[in-house]
Image: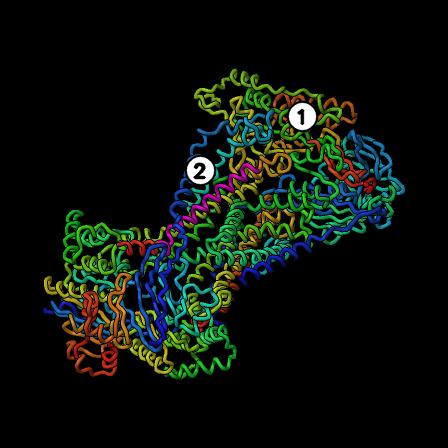
């Protein structure tokens, strides 16, 4: 039989998708920072005093003068939405910082230490986890009375175990890595091992969860405010603004749509950021990068 | 005293559910100063557990470890520090044995700083030992993910010997590496043994490799030592069926 | 000259647009055992993935041709390619246990493989499998078929992998580091069983490994790869006993050998 | 590819099932009285209101008995809140302590039993034996029955006795039939009979033998809807025929809308702020005066209540002879308030917009609750206007306000209160302004007020009583002990087809025999 | 298996003790004096002697631990006191409203499954292609809209404009559509993403390449192996969400006047009806724990890896 005829060398091409993870990450990060800046500088950039009432101008539809209209007290909605951003976003941030910090510490301790204390604390976290989130928050907020701080405390109470579990799981996963053994052989003490060798290596997934949680927490705070268990009037807070404006959906929709869109946009932004952070930290993408580096060498 | 390490009736058991597994079953051996001893066996033979017990990473369930003349039994924090002055270890997975977020140089320095050395001195010493292990200055500032497996293993050796231990334990230090790199590392280890006068405990599954570089060999099977002798003796005249099978399997 | 069973013609393979394997020309005959050796990153596994059409979305053979029995396989549509995989080309993985669905029994997946290629008689499949298991000296086929992959040891899973691949009696068997994850004693056994398969079915085998011992024991021809390129290619004995290239020499020298 | 088609099929099925569920509703035609069903959504029925169930002798449940046409009282109020006979024909004041009431002869309970003097006596005896408020209000010593009349003797002079009997707890029901075991249902004399009574719904059927004529609608379902938007949208979607308690913001959806009619009336429910005399700041006359001057009652009423109320001068609305403009309140005058405060030494020294005196910030704690939707609005409105005058307001709108009241941790308590449920002024004064009265939470005391109220207690002449009421109210206003913001206008919104369903100033009468649906 | 169930049941005891202890303590500290609260609605003063007597009668002068134990006994026998508002037994009220909530929860879960599994799988299969982006886009929207807002929009468009469904719940099939939809939208948004991730993870596993190398058709790989494995995780996630959903219905129930325990809870909170809140919190937690237990057991049964390890 003949040797297969040598045809001309065939060339195939395919469009190569560029890895846009980092670009996306920077875009979303910029947007989030922008959002945080707007919230931080709210008192400086609001066009009107968000608390100044003018009953003569109540419930005006959006106009050049009041871009998002006015609420029933004649307060400028745009100013209130911006101001509300400060309250809402920073309470969510504070809340997430609290539960992440506390939960991670507990998780680090439990995962590293193990033993009886570990199982005791994990049982306690089981108890907290057993309460369906919103239920417990409603109950605690109901008990403590309304108020933004109490709402934050209520949500913090039930949300920390999630981070404790996450951190603990991560610790257990890397506790037996050779580099931890190596660090111990280097004579490093437990505290040094936990904070220098374990924490930096588990912080990635925790940060991702924390970022994604900012959005969730904003929604839960809004839910509590909606029930009248969150921020108290006249404080501009998106959830309570929506709750206040809900009866005006048909008559003056801007009163509820403005804070509604604000919540929607910020939650989406934080979620998008969280997702991209996850992609950035994803071991798979990292491995691919490393492989690429190697092949370049 | 000529023995850096003496182990007698060492025992380690694990409980899994209701059954108890004896990972290390009353084994005894010793390492003389300047000697290179090999522990050979297949996975599950308990050889790595022995290494972990000697370095205090695992507790003992029985037996004694006499290190440089002193007995240690489940050492406390202080005692452990003394152990780490005497014994250091090189791990199987080179990249995993470095904290991915810390530069190689920093990792080598860590042990020195823990020993009480100043940062500057530690840095110089780290660079010195990295060079001994064939890594240039630039490697000190690289992350583990930025270097190859062989380079990482060199750094790992540098980290271990920088503390000038009397005994170096190599737990499958070469088995994850490519063959050409493997020979380089083995060569480095043999040089170090000669130049630094270090004793070595080599944990390995490859009899051929052991034959190249070790003075004595212990064959382990199911937690027991079944055969000892010089590599040549053992390979030439295996007494146990298992040892024979092991030798025959080498292609 | 017979038509080659498998032929690589000037193949270049790239990942994400970056070429990782270049200018590969290989060909093998039916019943031949081709050993591809090389160190990690040399691109040896990529070759068999390309031949099986398993490069994934990132990989692409952007130059050259791979022919199976003279038929170019690269531009086959999915269904035609599928019909090759199994009855024509089988594959053994480094870890056959994880190449099986973890929550289905081995028997179930074995039957599924056969059914997908037209044999849907359970009894027949069972009998065939049992016969094949006996060929590699496994008597309790029944128990193995009713087991889940995680219940078996690594060596046992490799042997199941061999049976799984051989059940459809392919003419070509790819083995990707089939023994690297095994202990030496088991390794020898698995190698012998693969040889037995060639004896029994006349299957051509491409074995990819970093272990020169395995290659010298099994292979008729050897291809040595380094950094994505073929550095030496020829009859196994010639290459191992009289290496022409520095790299090959280095590789062989580095291989610890036992002195008896 | 097959995966795709399977998923598609699944989607299709889902949509289909959804479509089936949405199948069209039944059509309507002319109906006989029996077929007519009136669905009524109300915010006012519920456990939180304390009026669940129809047993008049249990808390506030009598309101439900009366409102939903199950029971009736001996006398009732007309649109001007004047007394009219209902189950009674008339009454004679025999002396200061004795009243004889003559009953109608044609009234039967819905179980067919005749309403006799004995039956009424039995009912009232039980009332004063078991009810929590009635004995104190009525001060009844004894009741005797004689055929179709009863005679009531009181412990003290009780000029308002007959008025009190109009209170929903005065609903007459058949004591022999008693209260159903679940404690929720009774046999009354009204046009409707309750078939089922739950915490959230009352289902009524027409009482065919009603003494006042056959009801025009066969079935009435009263549904408790606690969410204002749901109530609005349920009315819009046609699930209910009429609604009580719509949020103000939504009323405009139904105003100028030909499909709906609105029936509104002024009520004596007032939004008031009670000042706490135990607080040092409040004790300052100037502060109280400035507070009264700084409340924008007009703005609150027209903008925030969207016109569903009338600015209040005093405790009683304008449809009372002693209400409305009969008293004079301080006009809304921020500048005036500033002057008053400045004169009293309250000056803003640190430039934060809040006045201080002797290092004490002019900051007041405004306690209120949210279950009345208007109260938080009032609080926010006040917060803004007071700030202009230099008074800082810390709003504490909480439904656990009772704890704060008990602790005395507040300066102002704003609440809603029905000031003249009996059409008589005495009730409000005896509960709010005299020493140690139940709701005088701010510990207001004025000797003159004490004397005047004492006179009121013993005065039987209606005109004189009215004059006394005006003097007392004026004194309270002059002292700025209470600030009255607004009287609530109550509105029923109903479909165009609904007739005979009107809002009553007393807030007692809702469903009557006049109710009809013309489709 | 039996042994495992027994073990899990034993593990439940400390958790239930924890739940009850926590809520008891919380309510104790929140509600203040129960006797004061009891007499709060009675007009006029009640003398301290009467109150003290009542306290003695209710055992409120006992030490904490004794109070707790006797109260716990009540919880377990369904005697959890009387509502401050309605004066009716709390537990009975709770139980009478539970079916409505369970009904709503189940329909929501079913709808969620019907939405999230097909779309999640589709998105994973079409990874990084248009369909995937589209599905992810919608899941982002669903994820960022507060439930109460969605419910208002749904009522406005589907009930008022299109007149398809009633606004209020009345137990009928049609009236459950809107609340179900509201709950399912939020849940589906979340679970579509989780299903996608899970399936993607599975698709990246070696056994998929293994199956392909054996010449098995893609749909067979997907349905027989990938989905079967992924479903284990997904079912667990969904089952776990039953618990959180039971609690998440509160706001939605009160908007749609759905007469379930969620609405009961919201009403009780607004009325400070502590015994009722307490009953709600405890029983929801216990139900949640129970559901988790059942899920775990089912998971155990379904996953041979765990099942055999346990038995072996």
Q: CA distance from mark 2 to mark 1?
A: 46 Å
Badge 1 marks a residue whose secondary structure is: loop
**Residue pictured at 16% horizontal, 62% vertical:** B86
Per the image, is A262 magenta? yes
Q: Nearer the viewer, mark 2 or mark 1?
A: 2
Residue stretch in magenta: A257-285
Residue that numbered label 2 is attached to: A35
Q: Nearer the viewer, residue E158 or E87?
A: E158
Dominant secondary structure (helix, strand or loop) of the stretch shown in magenta? helix
The answer to whether A252 is drawn above or below residue D184 in the figure is above
Residue that numbered label 1 is attached to: D312
Residue C23 placement: quadrant? bottom left
Per the image, is D324 magenta? no
Q: Residues within 10 Å of mark 1 (few under 14, many from 20)?
A: many
Q: Position of residue B108 (x, y in %)?
A: 20, 54
Q: Residues within 10 Å of mark 2 (few under 14, many from 20)?
A: many
**Mark 1 chain:** D
The answer to whether A16 is drawn above or below residue D398 in the figure is below
Quick one: quadrant of the C terminus of chain A?
Answer: bottom left
**Residue pictured at 76% horizontal, 41% vertical:** D67
**Residue pictured at 48% horizontal, 37% vertical:** A85
Quick one: quadrant of the N terminus of chain A?
Answer: bottom left
Q: Position of residue E166 (x, y in %)?
A: 69, 48
Res A60 seen here: yes
The answer to whether D39 is drawn above or below residue D362 in the figure is below
């Amino acid at each position: 039989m003949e040797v297969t005829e040598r045809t001309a060398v065939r060339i195939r091409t395919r469009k190569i998708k560029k890895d846009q993870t980092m670009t996306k990450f920077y875009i979303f990060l910029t947007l989030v920072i922008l959002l945080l800046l707007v919230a931080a500088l709210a008192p400086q950039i609001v066009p009107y005093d968000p608390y100044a009432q003018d009953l003569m101008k109540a419930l005006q539809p959006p106009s050049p003068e009041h871009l998002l209209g006015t609420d029933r007290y004649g307060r400028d909605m745009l100013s209130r939405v911006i101001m509300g951003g400060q309250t809402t976003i920073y309470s969510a941030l504070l809340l997430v910082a609290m539960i992440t910090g506390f939960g991670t510490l507990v998780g680090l301790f439990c995962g590293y230490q193990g033993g009886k204390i570990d199982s005791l604390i994990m049982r306690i976290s089981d108890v907290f986890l057993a309460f369906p989130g919103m239920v417990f928050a409603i109950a605690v907020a109901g008990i403590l009375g309304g108020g933004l701080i109490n709402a934050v405390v209520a949500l913090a109470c039930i949300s920390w175990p999630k981070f404790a579990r996450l951190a603990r799981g991560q610790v257990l996963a890397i506790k037996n890595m050779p580099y931890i053994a190596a660090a111990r052989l280097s004579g490093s003490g437990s505290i040094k091992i936990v904070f220098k060798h374990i924490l930096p290596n588990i912080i990635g997934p925790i940060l991702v969860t924390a970022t994604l949680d900012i959005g969730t927490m904003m929604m839960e705070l809004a839910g509590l405010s909606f029930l009248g268990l969150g921020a108290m009037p006249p404080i501009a807070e998106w959830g309570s603004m929506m709750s206040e404006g809900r009866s005006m959906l048909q008559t003056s929709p801007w009163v509820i749509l403005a804070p509604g869109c604000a919540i929607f946009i910020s939650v989406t932004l934080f979620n998008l950021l969280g997702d991209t952070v996850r992609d950035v930290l994803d071991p798979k993408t990292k491995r691919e990068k490393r492989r690429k580096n190697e092949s370049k060498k | 005293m000529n023995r850096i390490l003496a182990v007698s009736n060492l025992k380690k058991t694990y409980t899994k559910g209701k059954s108890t597994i004896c990972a290390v079953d009353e084994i005894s051996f010793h390492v003389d100063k300047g000697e290179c001893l090999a522990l050979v066996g297949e996975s599950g033979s308990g050889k790595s557990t022995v290494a972990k017990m000697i370095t205090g990473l695992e507790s003992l369930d029985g037996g004694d470890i006499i290190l440089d003349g002193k007995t240690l039994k489940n050492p406390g924090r202080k005692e452990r520090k003394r152990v780490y002055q005497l014994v250091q270890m090189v791990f199987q997975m080179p990249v995993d044995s470095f904290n991915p977020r810390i530069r190689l140089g920093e990792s080598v320095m860590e042990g020195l700083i823990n020993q009480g050395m100043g940062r500057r001195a530690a840095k110089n010493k780290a660079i010195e030992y990295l060079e001994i292990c064939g890594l240039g200055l630039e490697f000190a500032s690289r992350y583990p993910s930025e270097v190859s497996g062989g380079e990482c293993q060199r750094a790992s050796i540098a980290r271990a010997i920088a503390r000038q231990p009397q005994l170096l334990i190599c737990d499958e230090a070469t088995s994850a590496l490519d063959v050409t790199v493997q020979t380089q590392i083995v060569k480095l280890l043999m040089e170090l043994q000669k130049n630094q006068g270090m004793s070595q405990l080599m944990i390995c599954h490859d009899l051929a490799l052991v034959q190249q570089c070790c003075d004595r060999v212990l064959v382990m099977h199911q937690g027991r030592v079944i055969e000892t002798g010089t590599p040549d003796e053992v390979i030439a005249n295996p007494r146990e069926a298992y040892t024979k099978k092991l030798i025959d399997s080498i292609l | 000259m017979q038509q080659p069973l498998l032929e690589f013609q000037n193949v270049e393979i790239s990942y994400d647009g970056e070429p990782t394997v270049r200018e590969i020309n290989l060909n093998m005959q039916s019943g031949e055992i081709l050993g591809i050796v090389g160190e990690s990153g040399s691109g040896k596994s990529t070759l068999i993935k390309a031949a099986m059409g398993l490069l994934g979305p990132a990989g692409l053979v952007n130059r050259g041709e791979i022919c199976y029995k003279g038929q170019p396989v690269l531009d086959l549509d999915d269904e035609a390619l599928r019909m090759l995989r199994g009855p024509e080309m089988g594959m053994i993985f480094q870890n056959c246990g994880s190449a099986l669905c973890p929550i289905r029994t081995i028997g179930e997946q074995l039957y599924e493989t056969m059914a997908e290629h037209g044999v849907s008689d359970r009894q027949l499949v069972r009998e065939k499998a049992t016969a094949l298991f006996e060929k590699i000296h496994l008597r309790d086929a029944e128990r193995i078929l009713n087991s889940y992959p995680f219940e078996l040891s690594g060596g046992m899973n490799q042997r199941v992998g061999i049976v799984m691949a051989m059940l459809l009696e392919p003419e070509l068997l790819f083995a990707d580091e089939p023994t690297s994850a095994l202990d030496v004693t088991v390794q020898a056994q698995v190698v012998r069983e693969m040889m037995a398969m060639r004896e029994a079915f006349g299957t051509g085998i491409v074995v990819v490994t970093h272990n020169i011992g395995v290659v010298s024991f099994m292979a008729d021809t050897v291809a040595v790869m380094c950094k994505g390129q073929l550095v030496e290619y020829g009859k196994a004995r010639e290459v191992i006993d009289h290496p022409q290239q520095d790299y090959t020499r280095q590789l062989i020298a580095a291989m610890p050998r036992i002195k008896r | 590819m097959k995966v795709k088609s399977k998923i598609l099929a699944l989607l299709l099925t889902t949509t289909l099932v959804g479509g089936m569920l949405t199948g069209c509703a039944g059509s309507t035609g002319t109906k006989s009285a029996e077929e007519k069903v009136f669905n009524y959504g109300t915010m006012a029925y519920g456990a939180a209101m304390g009026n669940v169930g129809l047993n008049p002798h249990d808390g506030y449940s009598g309101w439900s008995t009366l409102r939903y046409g199950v029971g009736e009282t001996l006398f009732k109020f007309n649109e001007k809140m004047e007394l009219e006979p209902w189950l009674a024909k008339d009454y004679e004041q025999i002396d200061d302590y004795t009243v004889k009431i003559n009953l109608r002869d044609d009234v039967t309970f819905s179980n067919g039993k005749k309403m006799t003097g004995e039956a009424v006596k039995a009912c009232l005896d039980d009332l004063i034996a078991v009810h929590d408020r009635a004995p104190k209000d009525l001060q009844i010593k004894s009741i005797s029955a004689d055929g179709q009349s009863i005679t009531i003797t009181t412990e003290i002079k009780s000029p308002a006795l007959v008025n009190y009997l109009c209170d929903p707890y005065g609903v007459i029901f058949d004591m022999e039939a008693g209260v159903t075991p679940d404690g929720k249902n009774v046999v009354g004399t009204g046009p409707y009979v309750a078939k089922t009574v739950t915490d959230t719904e009352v289902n009524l059927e027409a009482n065919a033998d009603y003494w006042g004529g056959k009801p025009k609608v066969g079935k009435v379902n009263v549904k408790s809807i606690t969410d204002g938007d749901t109530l609005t949208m349920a009315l819009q979607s046609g699930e209910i025929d009429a609604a009580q308690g719509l949020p103000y913001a939504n009323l405009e959806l139904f105003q100028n809308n030909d499909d709906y009619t609105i029936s509104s009336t002024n009520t004596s429910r007032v939004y008031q702020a009670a000042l706490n005399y135990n607080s040092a700041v409040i004790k300052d006359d100037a502060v109280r005066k400035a507070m009264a001057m700084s409340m924008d009652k007009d703005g609150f009423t027209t903008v925030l209540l969207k016109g569903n109320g009338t600015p209040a001068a005093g405790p009683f609305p304008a449809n009372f002879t002693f209400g409305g403009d009969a008293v004079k309140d301080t006009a809304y005058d921020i500048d005036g308030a500033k002057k008053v405060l400045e004169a009293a030494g309250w000056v803003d020294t640190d430039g934060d917009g809040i006045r201080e005196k002797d290092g004490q910030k002019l900051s007041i704690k405004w306690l209120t609750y949210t279950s009345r939707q208007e109260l938080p609005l009032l609080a926010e409105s006040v917060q803004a206007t007071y700030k202009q005058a230099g008074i800082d307001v810390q709003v504490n709108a909480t439904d656990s306000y009772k704890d704060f009241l008990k602790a005395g941790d507040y300066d102002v308590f704003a609440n809603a209160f029905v000031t003249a449920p009996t059409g008589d002024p005495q009730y409000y004064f005896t509960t709010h302004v005299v020493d140690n009265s139940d709701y005088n939470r701010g510990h207001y005391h004025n000797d003159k007020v004490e004397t005047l109220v004492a006179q009121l207690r013993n005065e039987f002449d209606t005109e004189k009583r009215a004059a006394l009421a005006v003097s007392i109210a004026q004194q309270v206003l002059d002292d700025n002990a209470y600030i009255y913001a607004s009287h609530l206008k109550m509105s029923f919104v109903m479909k165009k087809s609904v007739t005979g369903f009107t809002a009553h100033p007393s807030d007692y009468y809702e469903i009557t025999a006049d109710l009809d649906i013309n489709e | 298996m039996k042994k495992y169930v027994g073990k899990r049941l034993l593990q439940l005891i400390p958790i239930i003790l924890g739940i009850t202890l926590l809520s008891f303590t919380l309510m104790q500290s929140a509600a203040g004096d129960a006797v004061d609260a009891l007499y709060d609605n009675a007009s006029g003063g009640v003398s301290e002697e009467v109150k003290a007597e009542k306290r003695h009668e209710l055992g409120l002068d006992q030490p904490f631990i004794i109070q707790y134990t006797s109260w716990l006994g009540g919880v377990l026998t369904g005697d959890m006191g009387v509502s401050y508002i309605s004066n009716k037994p709390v537990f009975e009220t709770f139980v009478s409203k539970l079916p409505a909530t369970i009904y709503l929860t189940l329909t929501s879960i079913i709808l969620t499954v019907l939405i999230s599994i097909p779309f999640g799988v589709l998105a994973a299969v079409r990874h990084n292609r248009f369909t995937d982006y589209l599905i992810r886009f919608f899941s982002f929207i669903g994820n960022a809209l507060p439930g109460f807002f969605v419910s208002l929009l749904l009522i406005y468009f589907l009930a008022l404009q299109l007149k398809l469904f009633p606004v209020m719940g009345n137990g009928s099939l049609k009236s459950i559509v809107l609340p179900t939809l509201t709950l399912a939208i939020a849940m589906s948004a979340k679970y579509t993403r989780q299903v996608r991730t899970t399936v993607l993870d599975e698709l990246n596993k070696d056994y998929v390449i293994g199956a392909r190398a054996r010449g098995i058709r893609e749909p067979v790989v997907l349905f027989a192996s990938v989905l079967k494995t992924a479903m284990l995780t997904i079912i667990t996630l969904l089952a776990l969400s039953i618990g959180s959903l039971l609690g998440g219905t509160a706001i939605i129930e009160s908007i749609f006047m759905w007469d379930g325990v969620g609405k009961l809870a919201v009403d009780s909170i607004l009325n400070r009806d502590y015994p009722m809140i307490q009953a709600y919190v405890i029983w929801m937690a216990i139900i949640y724990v129970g559901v988790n237990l059942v899920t775990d057991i089912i998971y155990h049964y379904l996953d041979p890896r765990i099942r055999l390890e346990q038995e072996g």
